[in-house]
Image (spheres, rainbow, N blue to C red):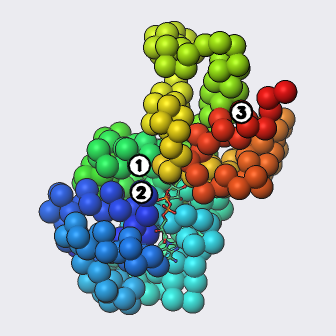
Amino acid sequence: MKKIGFIGLGNMGLPMSRSLLLSNYTVYGMDLNEEAEMSFHQSGGTIGVSVENMVKQCDVILTSLPSANAVEEVFLGEKGLVYLVESGVMLIDTSTVAPDLNVRIEVAAKKKDVDFLAAPVSGGVIGAVNRTLTFMVGGAKPVFDKALPLFNAMGENIFHVNDRIDSGTNTKLINNLLIGFYTAGVSEALHLAKNSNLDLERLFEMLNVSYGQSRIYERNYKSFIANDNYEPGFSLELLRKDLRFALGLAEKNGVELPLSKILFDLYEEAIKDGYGEKDMSILYKKISEHSTN
Ligand code: NAD
């Protein structure tokens, strides 16, 4: 497996594709955004190859796309990957989508005798840049084993969850449900601290060695809130997408999650207020700007 296609060169896909280049894979990249393609090209990647040619030249095609609609179009659309590829090419989606979309892609891929893995990631842009991502992979174990060198080139903690194609996605949705809670908790706690005569930097020093510590507190505070800079990162819109999928999973499995519903409404409201494209840590700003008496 030496030739890789990479579709979706955004905040995650660009550094992930660069990691593959650093591991000496030949990488053909594609994005709807010209600027993203140019950055990829400047890193040594090849652009300008159509999907039709990509599937002919590559052993594996990876995707990192922003929405279930984009994944649906790229895999199952009129010129979808599953219809263009020949048996022997492997498809790996690293986006976070609804679990039932993983299943639909797997069904279509199986009809073509094409291997497919649903491999969502955690660790953010920093993890993608530093090659320390966590992969949560669902799909057949022999296919996972074949893809392992690729995952190792991009990440540090690589998990095969189980043979069910949606098992990685279900794991990832639980992870992001927690991220949603942590981000909301950090936002309200810091808002209270700021209005209680506490210095946020000093607070971080103390809580970082107390049980109030969390990786999300560290990430949201140190990389965004402390600098008053909310360029993503992981956009609030993407987190809302994942919370919606998590609620969908709960509904499908007949599980009541009353707090998660309140949480989802909070993110919905933040998006209505225009914060959707900013990093999720901007929830702190929304809460502090909209809830002081
Ligand atoms: P992004 O919006 O920064 O990047 C997505 C890229 O896909 C964009 O450059 C866009 O132009 C491109 N694109 C959209 N539709 C396309 C199409 N049909 N063909 C080709 N390119 C297309 O999003 P991101 O932050 O990189 O996230 C990508 C995926 O990874 C999402 O599913 C997200 O949930 C997941 N994820 C993101 C993070 C994070 O911290 N950003 C962390 C873990 C997982």
**Which of the 4 quarters of the picture holds residue 52?**
bottom left
Which kind of residue does numbered mark 3 sit on? Ser
**Which of the 4 quarters of the picture holds residue 266?**
top right
What mark, if any, has residue 12 been given in the picture?
2
Which kind of residue does numbered mark 2 sit on? Met
As displayed, is residue 84 above or below residue 73? below
What mark, if any, has residue 288 been given in the picture?
3
Q: Are marks 1 and 3 in contact (CB under 8 Å)?
A: no
Tell me if the residue at label 2 has its CB under 8 Å from ligand 1: yes
What mark, if any, has residue 125 been given in the picture?
1
Q: Distance from label 2 to label 3 (Cα)?
A: 29 Å
Of the residues under marks 1 and 3, which one precedes in the sequence?
A: 1
Q: Distance from label 1 to label 3 (Cα)?
A: 26 Å
Q: Distance from label 2 to label 1 (Cα)?
A: 6 Å
**Which of the 4 quarters of the picture holds residue 174?**
top right
Q: Nearer the viewer, residue 140 or 168?
A: 168
Instruction: Say which residue appears at 35% left-offset and 39% top-offset.
Output: 157
As displayed, is residue 38 above or below residue 234? below
Tell me if the residue at label 1 has its CB under 8 Å from ligand 1: yes
User: Can residue 82 be seen at all in this image of the molecule?
Assistant: no
Of the residues under marks 2 and 3, which one precedes in the sequence?
A: 2
- Residue 140 appears at what percent x and percent y? 43, 57
